[in-house]
Amino acid sequence: MFSPAISELLRNPLRKISVLTGAGISAESGIPTFRGPEGYWTIGSTVYTPQEVATYAMFTRHPEEVWSWYLYRFTVCLDAAPNAGHLALAELERKLGDRFTLITQNIDNLHLRAGNSPQRTFQIHGNINHVRCANECSKEMPLLAEPLRRRRESRDLSEAEWALLRCERCRGWLRPHVLWFDEFYDEEHFRFESSVRAASGTDLLIIVGTSGTTTLPNHVASIVHQRGGTILDINIEESAFTPLARSSNHGAFIKQPAARALPALARLCR
């Protein structure tokens, strides 16, 4: 499945390895893709798409409804378990150490639950487990309150439960720590500069389960390609990354599910 050149890159102590993951790896754990039919949400008599719900503009108009949608998504993520692909990436990090960087678009926390470290995992779209003040009165990102983490129904919260979604300092709304469609990447919350620096030093970029529809992942892949790095695109179908992978040095498109391809890749490391 993998060429000798890929084995050499993984085993060479001077080579840096980065992994870029998207919704495809978590779909194998039963988490619907963000743009799938489960993403749609009804407010009153109007049906909204994820691109409409997951915005700061919608949050300012309907914070309770946006929170209801995210609390529902949280229960879906909480019920899911890391699959063999997630576990293989945690194994890769253990074997590669500081040579390894994981850049993930996923907000489901499954990489950290599988064993990847927060220090080497750049969650560029945030983490649904965390909240922060919408007024930015605090830079802290505490975990979602435990009573809300246990909720199986996200609508009709009690007054006490709604109060848990208010900032202790300013009493304004807390917000999910996620990148919304009408927001921009930054370093403080979403590790923009860190991801660019990692790409600038990457010899092998492994892209897993993402279609290439967001800007920072495309920028990361472009940097690696332009500097002559190797790109592997592991997915069940071709994507915008596939031509980059095929035209890169020793790169390839691997048409395999992540849970099958990544354990085989991890076994190449000694």
Image (tube, grey):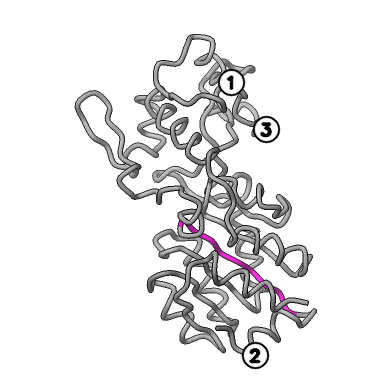
Q: Residue at x 30, y 39 (%)?
A: 40
Residue placed furthest toward the left: 45
The amino acid at mark 3 is: Glu
Residue 93 location, quadrant: bottom right
**Quadrant including the N terminus:** bottom right
The reply to whether the C-beta atoms of the residues labelled 1 and 2 are less than 8 Å apart is no
Of the residues under marks 3 and 1, which one precedes in the sequence?
3
Q: Nearer the viewer, residue 184 or 218?
A: 218
Q: Residues within 10 Å of mark 1 (few under 14, many from 20)?
A: few
Q: Is residue 68 left or right of residue 192?
A: left
User: What residue did someone put label 3 on?
Assistant: 140
Q: Is residue 21 magenta?
A: yes
Picture disc at residue 147: 1
Residue 45 location, quadrant: top left
Of the residues under marks 2 and 3, which one precedes in the sequence?
2
Spatial separation of the CA atoms under disc 1 and disc 2:
51 Å
Residue 259 in the image: state x and y as whole percent: 54, 64
Residue 240 location, quadrant: bottom left
Q: Is residue 15 left or right of residue 148?
A: right
Q: Is 47 situated above or below 91?
A: above
Q: Which residues are magenta?
A: 15-23
- Front: mark 3 or 1: 1
Picture disc at residue 222: none
The amino acid at mark 2 is: Pro
Spatial separation of the CA atoms under disc 2 and disc 3:
45 Å
The amino acid at mark 1 is: Pro
User: What residue did someone put label 2 on?
Assistant: 4
Q: Residues within 10 Å of mark 3 (few under 14, many from 20)?
A: few
Q: Is 242 situated above or below 95?
A: below
The reply to whether the C-beta atoms of the residues labelled 3 and 1 are less than 8 Å apart is no
